[in-house]
C-alpha cells in the first residue's frame, strides 16, 4: 500500500529527533576531563569544530547536489556512530580531537541534507506551499531531542558513567539509521562535468550567482548575525549562572528551558507561519536582540539567583524568536533556485552563519567574563544588523 506523506515525514522527523539526542552534550566538559583534557581544551576544540564546519560547508554543499540527500543523511549518521564507537574504545587528546573533527563533518552533512530532503519530498507531492510548516515541525523534533539529552544525559552519566552513555548513544543512532533507510530516495537532476576543473568552475559560478541575488544575500547575512549572537547567548548561560552563584542543579533546568523554547519555535513556525511578515520580523528582532544584550549586562551585576535564572529564561524566549525567523528564512530561500542548486544554497547560508559564529566564539574565549567584550559585540550587532535590515527593507519583495 502506498504510504502517505505524513507517514514518511513522521519517520524522517523521528530519525532526526533520535539523532539530536546527543547524550554527552550536557556533560561534555566532564567527559573531556575524564580523558585528561581541560576547560581550555574544550574551548579550543569548539573552535576546531566550527573551523572544520566552515571548511566542509562548500564541498559538502556540492556533494549534496550530486547525490540523493537521503544518502547524505545515512553517511552523516554512520560517521556519528563511528565517533561514539571510537570514543568508547580509545581515549586521549588525539582521539577526542579526531572525534570533534568528524562530528563537524557529520553535522554539516546533516544540516545541508535535511531541509533539502523535506523540500524535495514535498515537491514530489505538489505540497511545496507546506514547506514552512513541515520544516518548523522538523526543527521542533530536533530541539525536543536536544532537550531530552539535556536531562537524560546528565542522569545517565552520574549513575552509570560515560561507557553506558556512549553505548546508549550507539543504540539510538542505529535506530535512526534504520528509520532513514525506510524513507523514499529522491533522485535529483544530475549536472554533467567533463573534469574536476569543470565541477569547480560550475560550483564557483553558481555560488557567485546566489550571492548576487538581493532577495537572498542580505537575509543570509542577517540570519547569520542573529544565529551567532543566539549561540553566544546560550553559551554564556553557565558562566553567568556561576558568576551569580546559581545552584548547580539549575544548570540542567536552564538548559532544558533553552531547548524547550527552541522546540516551541518549530511548533509556532509550523502552525502560524502565514501570520508572520518576515520583513517586519527582521526589524522587530533588531530591537529585541538589543534588549537581550541589556539582559546579559543585567546578569553581570545580578547577585540574586532567582533573578538571574528569570533573565536567562527571557533570553531563551528571544532565541526562540530568532529560530522562528531562521525557519521562515530557510523555507523562503528555496523559491529562488533550481532543485539541483538547493544544497549549495544551504551551504552558502550555513557557511556565512558558521563563519560569523566562529569569529564570535573564538574571541569570546578571551573575553567571556569581560563586559567590554559584550559592548564590542553589541556595537558590531547594531552596525551590521541595521545595515542588513535596511537592505532587506529595500528589496521591494512582498513577503
Image (cartoon, helix red, strand yellow):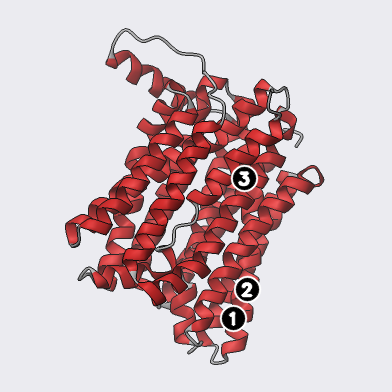
Q: Mark 2 or 3 closer to N-term?
A: 3
- How crowded is the residue under tag 3: few (<14 C-alpha within 10 Å), some, or many (20+)? many
Residue 85 x %, y %: 29, 51
Q: Are marks 1 and 2 in contact (CB under 8 Å)?
A: yes
- Say which residue appears at 52% left-offset and 59% top-offset: 146
- Say which residue appears at 20% left-offset and 71% top-offset: 36
- Say which residue appears at 31% left-offset and 50% top-offset: 83
Q: Quadrant of the C terminus?
A: top right
Task: Work out whether residue 361 or residue 7 is closer to the camera in this orientation and state it.
Answer: 7
186 left or right, relative to 277: left
Give the residue at mark 3: 138
Q: How many marks are shown on the rendered structure?
A: 3
- Residue 331, located in which quarter of the rendered image? top right
- How crowded is the residue under tag 2: few (<14 C-alpha within 10 Å), some, or many (20+)? some
Give the residue at mark 2: 313
Give the residue at mark 1: 309
Q: Mark 3 or 1 closer to N-term?
A: 3
- Say which residue appears at 39% left-offset and 72% top-offset: 157
Q: Quadrant of the N terminus?
A: top right
Amino acid at each position: 500500500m502506498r504510504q502517505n506523506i505524513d507517514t514518511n515525514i513522521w519517520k524522517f522527523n523521528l530519525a532526526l529527533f533520535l539523532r539530536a539526542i546527543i547524550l554527552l552534550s550536557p556533560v561534555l566538559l566532564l567527559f573531556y576531563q575524564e580523558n585528561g583534557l581541560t576547560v581550555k581544551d574544550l574551548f579550543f576544540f569548539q573552535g576546531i569544530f566550527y573551523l572544520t564546519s566552515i571548511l566542509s560547508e562548500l564541498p559538502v554543499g556540492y556533494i549534496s547536489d550530486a547525490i540523493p540527500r537521503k544518502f547524505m543523511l545515512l553517511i552523516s549518521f554512520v560517521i556519528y556512530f563511528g565517533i561514539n564507537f571510537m570514543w568508547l574504545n580509545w581515549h586521549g587528546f588525539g582521539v577526542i580531537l579526531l572525534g570533534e573533527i568528524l562530528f563537524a563533518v557529520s553535522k554539516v552533512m546533516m544540516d545541508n541534507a535535511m531541509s533539502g530532503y523535506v523540500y524535495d519530498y514535498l515537491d514530489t507531492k505538489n505540497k511545496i506551499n507546506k514547506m514552512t510548516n513541515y520544516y518548523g515541525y522538523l526543527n521542533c523534533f530536533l530541539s525536543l531531542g536536544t532537550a531530552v539529552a539535556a536531562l537524560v544525559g546528565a542522569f545517565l552519566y552520574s549513575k552509570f558513567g560515560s561507557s553506558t552513555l556512549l553505548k546508549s548513544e550507539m543504540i539510538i543512532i542505529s535506530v535512526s539509521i534504520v528509520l532513514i533507510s525506510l524513507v523514499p530516495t529522491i533522485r535529483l537532476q544530475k549536472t554533467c562535468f567533463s573534469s574536476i576543473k569543470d565541477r569547480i568552475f560550475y560550483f564557483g559560478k553558481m555560488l557567485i550567482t546566489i550571492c548576487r541575488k538581493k532577495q537572498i544575500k542580505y537575509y543570509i547575512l542577517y540570519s547569520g548575525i542573529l544565529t551567532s549572537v543566539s549561540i553566544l547567548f546560550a553559551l554564556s548561560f553557565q558562566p553567568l549562572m556561576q558568576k551569580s552563584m546559581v545552584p548547580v542543579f539549575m544548570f540542567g533546568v536552564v538548559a532544558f528551558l533553552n531547548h524547550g523554547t527552541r522546540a516551541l519555535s518549530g511548533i509556532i513556525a509550523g502552525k502560524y507561519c502565514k501570520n508572520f511578515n518576515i520583513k517586519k520580523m527582521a526589524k522587530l528582532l533588531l530591537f529585541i536582540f538589543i534588549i537581550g544584550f541589556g539582559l546579559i549586562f543585567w546578569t553581570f551585576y545580578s547577585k540574586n539567583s532567582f533573578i538571574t535564572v528569570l533573565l536567562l529564561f527571557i533570553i531563551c524566549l528571544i532565541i526562540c524568536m530568532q529560530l522562528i525567523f531562521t525557519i521562515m528564512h530557510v523555507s523562503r530561500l528555496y523559491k529562488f533556485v533550481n532543485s539541483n542548486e538547493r544544497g549549495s544554497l544551504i551551504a552558502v547560508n550555513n557557511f556565512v552563519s558558521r563563519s560569523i559564529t566562529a569569529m564570535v566564539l573564538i574571541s569570546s574565549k578571551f573575553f567571556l567574563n569581560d563586559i567590554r567584550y559584550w559592548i564590542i559585540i553589541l556595537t558590531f550587532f547594531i552596525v551590521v544588523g541595521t545595515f542588513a535590515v535596511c537592505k532587506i527593507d529595500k528589496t521591494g519583495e512582498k513577503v
